[in-house]
Amino acid sequence: MVLSILVAGLFLVAYLWSAKTGQFEDPDANAFRILIDDERARESKNKNQIK
């Protein structure tokens, strides 16, 4: 029983730390960032080929 309370306390501390450091502020940004980077890379590649 003491071990389960200790584990639950560790999860609570980890959650509070991650919420305080901003881990949950914008969960969709990382999913869309890769799409934006691909578009930028494609545009710069096309510009280099035209020259």
Image (spheres, rainbow, N blue to C red):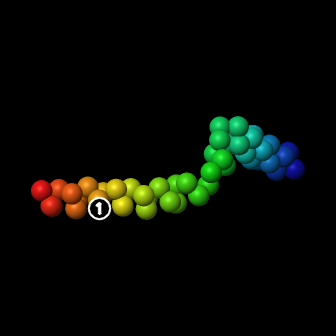
Q: Quadrant of residue 37?
A: bottom left
Q: Residue at x 84, y 46 (%)?
A: 5
| Left or right position of 24 against 31 | right
Q: Nearer the viewer, residue 39 or 30?
A: 39
Q: How many marks?
A: 1
Q: Sort mark 1 into few (<14), some (14-19) or many (20+) by Cα contacts within 10 Å.
A: few
| One can see residue 4 in this view | yes
Q: Position of residue 40 (x, y in %)?
A: 34, 56
| One can see residue 10 in this view | no
Question: Mark 1 belongs to which amino acid?
Answer: Arg
Q: Position of residue 12 (x, y in %)?
A: 78, 44
| Left or right position of 4 against 47 | right
Which residue is situated farthest in the left direction here?
51
Q: Position of residue 15 (x, y in %)?
A: 73, 45
Q: Residue at x 71, y 43 (%)?
A: 19
Position of the C terminus by quadrant: bottom left
Q: Nearer the viewer, residue 10 or 51?
A: 51
Q: Residue at x 75, y 41 (%)?
A: 16
Q: Which residue is tagged 1?
A: 42
In this rendering, the answer to whether 8 lies above or below 51 is above
User: Does dot 1 land on a helix, a strand or a loop?
Assistant: helix
Q: Quadrant of residue 27?
A: bottom right
Q: Position of residue 14 (x, y in %)?
A: 70, 43
Q: Quadrant of residue 20?
A: top right
In this rendering, the answer to whether 7 lies above or below 38 is above
Q: Residue at x 55, y 54 (%)?
A: 29
